[in-house]
Image (cartoon, helix red, strand yellow):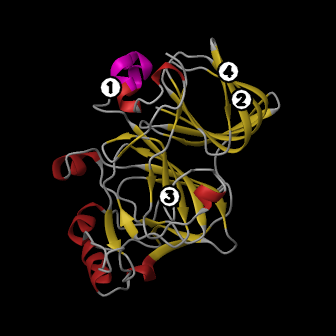
């Protein structure tokens, strides 16, 4: 086993922009790139290996060949690969939406629910997003406000800046706003319930589907309780620093500011997504140059040294 450099499945939803092509180097004929699934092992998108003897195989094919030893005991306890990591370029605002928890999603959708974390990589001046509600309301009021288009009156609009963190528990109403580029670490699920899309038309010229009844079932109609913004303990490691962005039973995510060398070693797999700079990854038997947008899957118990100067998102289960 060895670290895998992965290509990213790309999505061109109507709200996306061109930063992931222009600034992150994702090559595509798509006019816009809304999402780059930088760590993906899902039926709706599967990364492809770009290096070594597994070159050309999908991540799911490689993990089937390598077995649970590649992902570690914690990840192997999940019924399928546990993480999906994305870079999201919101040129326009996303729909107001919510994700179900595991119990509801398995019963209704046949896949796990979706708790996620947002790390604001960049944003335009004045950008804002929606994170939960400003006050607790009943389900009846929630439904009424959805149907009479007053739901935004009770949404928690948050001005954002680079480096902000939001932990989006399943059931939390949310929407990424216009002019924000986000790194998202989430459960490996693609189940989303749209509450409102502001009357916007899809690529087919028709209003995009809403999922109001399901959203009413799963939404926590109250303000969020998890601290957000410029949160997360920072630990210095030599000349580098690690900031803890999220830690829960589903995943851990950290922001690495690298200056020099930093060793990655874990009894479970580790994902490294480069957000800026030029970074070299070295391991016993090989090395790779990584640039902005590069995604590296490091198998469990594979000691890897990152060197150079830049910033990376480091995620594990």
In what element is the residue under mark 2? strand
Q: Is residue 214 above or below residue 301?
A: below
- Marks 4 and 1 close (CB-CB < 8 Å): no
Relative side of 216 to 161, left or right: left
Pointer 1: what residue? Answer: 77
Report x, y in % for residue 92: 52, 73
In what element is the residue under mark 3? loop
1 or 2: mark nearer the eye: 2
Relative side of 65 to 158, left or right: left
Pointer 3: what residue? Answer: 29
In the foreground, 43 or 156: 43
Question: Does 73 appear in magenta?
Answer: yes
- Marks 4 and 2 close (CB-CB < 8 Å): yes
2 or 3: mark nearer the eye: 3
Q: Residues within 10 Å of mark 3 (few under 14, many from 20)?
A: few
Q: CA distance from mark 1 to mark 3?
A: 38 Å
Pointer 2: what residue? Answer: 280
Pointer 4: what residue? Answer: 282
Looking at the image, which residue is at 47% across and 70% down? 15
| Range of magenta residues | 62-74
In the foreground, 201 or 212: 201
Q: CA distance from mark 4 to mark 1?
A: 29 Å
- Marks 2 and 3 close (CB-CB < 8 Å): no
Question: Does 20 appear in magenta?
Answer: no
């Amino acid at each position: 086993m060895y670290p895998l450099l992965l290509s990213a499945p790309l999505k061109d939803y109507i709200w996306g922009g061109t930063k992931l092509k222009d600034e992150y180097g994702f090559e595509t004929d798509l006019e816009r790139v809304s999402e780059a699934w930088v760590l993906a092992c899902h039926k709706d998108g599967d990364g492809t290996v770009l290096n070594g003897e597994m070159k050309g195989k999908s991540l799911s094919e490689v993990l089937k060949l390598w077995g649970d030893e590649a992902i570690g005991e914690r990840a192997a306890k999940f019924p399928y690969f546990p993480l999906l990591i994305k870079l999201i370029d919101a040129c326009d605002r996303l729909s107001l939406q919510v994700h179900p928890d595991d119990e509801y999603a398995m019963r209704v959708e046949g896949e796990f629910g979706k708790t996620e974390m947002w790390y604001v990589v960049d944003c335009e001046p004045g950008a804002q997003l929606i994170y939960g509600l400003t006050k607790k309301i009943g389900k009846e009021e929630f439904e009424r406000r959805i149907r009479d288009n007053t739901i935004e009156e009770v949404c928690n609009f948050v001005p954002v800046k680079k480096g902000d963190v939001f932990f989006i528990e399943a059931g939390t109403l949310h929407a990424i706003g216009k002019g924000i580029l986000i790194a998202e670490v989430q459960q490996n699920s693609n189940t989303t319930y749209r509450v409102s899309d502001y009357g916007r038309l899809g690529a087919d010229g028709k209003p995009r589907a809403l999922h109001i009844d399901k959203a009413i079932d799963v939404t926590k109609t109250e303000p969020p309780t998890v601290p957000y913004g410029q949160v997360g303990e920072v630990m210095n490691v030599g000349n580098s620093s690690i900031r803890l962005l999220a830690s829960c039973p589903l995943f851990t995510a950290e922001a690495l500011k690298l200056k020099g060398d930093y060793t990655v070693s874990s009894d479970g797999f580790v994902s490294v997504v480069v957000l800026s700079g030029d970074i070299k990854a070295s391991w016993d038997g090989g090395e790779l140059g990584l640039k902005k947008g590069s995604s590296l899957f490091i198998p469990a118990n594979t000691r890897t040294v990152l060197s150079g100067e830049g910033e990376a998102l480091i995620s594990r289960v």
